[in-house]
Amino acid sequence: QKEVEATRRDGGEAAAAVDDFLEVLAVSHTVMVGEDSRGNVKFEAESPDEGALVEACRGLGWDFCARSGQNMTVKVSRPGASSPETRSYTVLAVNAFTSARKRMSVVVRG
């Protein structure tokens, strides 16, 4: 985590590549956002792996905040920025995970 944060802070091509990768992870899923009994954010995922990836992105500055129908919202915290940037995405298609394909695909517009 520290290496990723340092790369993002340094800027340049490596930082852009890291952010591109985190953006893909932050939006390529079917996770829903809920709250636990204490009001804390709780991710509801179809698999533990999917939830773990979204949680990891959150810890690295790409916070998946909401899903409503085909629309999703992500807050991006950039190193040195005073406040996070809110980004909206529209899910155009989902090719669900199957045991035959062993992967899922998501097409979004952002």
Image: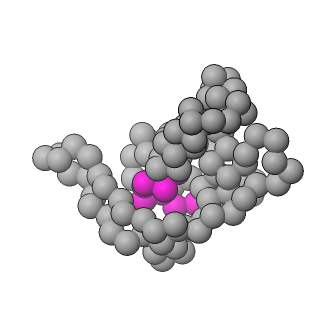
Residue drawn at point x = 62 percent, y = 48 percent: 62
Residue drawn at point x = 42 percent, y = 65 percent: 108
Q: Looking at this rendering, what residue extends furthest in the bottom direction? A: 69
Where is residue 9 drawn, in percent x and y? 72, 33
Residue drawn at point x = 17 percent, y = 47 percent: 101
Q: Nearer the viewer, residue 14 or 68?
A: 14
Q: Residue 11 colored magenta?
A: no
Q: Nearer the viewer, residue 13 or 36?
A: 13
Q: Does 58 sit above or below residue 107?
A: above
Q: Does 19 sit above or below residue 75?
A: above
Q: Nearer the viewer, residue 99 or 78?
A: 78
76 lies left or right of 106: right
Q: How is the image coloured?
A: one colour
Where is residue 90 drawn, in percent x and y? 48, 72
Span of residues in magenta: 26-34
Residue drawn at point x = 20 percent, y = 51 percent: 98
Where is residue 65 drawn, in percent x and y? 63, 60
Residue 37 visible here: no
